[in-house]
Image (cartoon, grey):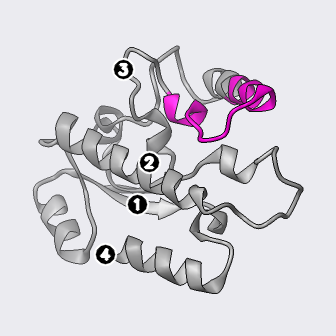
Amino acid sequence: MLVDLHAHYPMHVGSREKKGARAWMTETHRVGFWEKIRAWLLKSLNDHENFPAPNEPAITVPNLKAGNVGVVLSVLYAPFDEMDLNKKYAAPPEPGYFKDLQMQLAAVEQEVRNCYDHDAVVVHNHHELEEAMNARKVALIHAIEGGFHLGDNETQIKKNVETLRK
């Protein structure tokens, strides 16, 4: 069994939906010309570099199972929050960045539960991990890329980390 320590599974959530793959990367609470340009650029790069064919993501539960991957750190990451063109470089993060993270987390859990219930599960603790491994399911563990998602001060960060812990 293999363990993938850094898989961007969330960027493939919704690939079967009518609006197309990677829709979460273009769904942002910010609007404007530069946001649309950035969304187009990011989608174009992703199509060219990350997908073997249009709307065929490489990181899927069937591909993970076929590759004998048993545990995946499913990286939650909102590129538009890190590259917020409405802010100066190194500006404090916005409170909405945590909401974006929570939306990705919920979308991953819903897709795995609704589409891959027999083959995969999102695990939240050691007991769930053992159950997944015993059932020969792919175990996805949420991981966060970029501390900017968590807040702009110690109080907010502690509150958001506690929310994730629960």
User: Is 79 situated above or below 75?
Assistant: above
Q: CA distance from mark 4 to mark 1?
A: 13 Å
Q: Is residue 79 above or below residue 156?
A: above
Q: Is residue 44 left or right of residue 115?
A: right
- The reply to whether dot 1 and dot 3 touch (C-beta < 8 Å) is no
Inspect the image, locate mark 1, and give the three-letter code of the amino acid beneath it.
His
Which residue appears at 64% of the width and 25% of the height? Answer: 43
Residue 68 shows up from this direction: yes
| SS state under label 3 | loop
Per the rendering, the mark at residue 142 is 1
Amino acid type assigned to the residue bearing label 3 in the image: Glu
Q: Relative to 102, is 36 on the left or the right?
A: right
Question: Mark 2 — residue?
Answer: 104
The region drawn magenta spans 22-42
Q: Looking at the figure, which quarter contains the N terminus?
A: bottom left
Q: Position of residue 114 (x, y in %)?
A: 18, 37
**N-term mark: 4 or 1:** 1
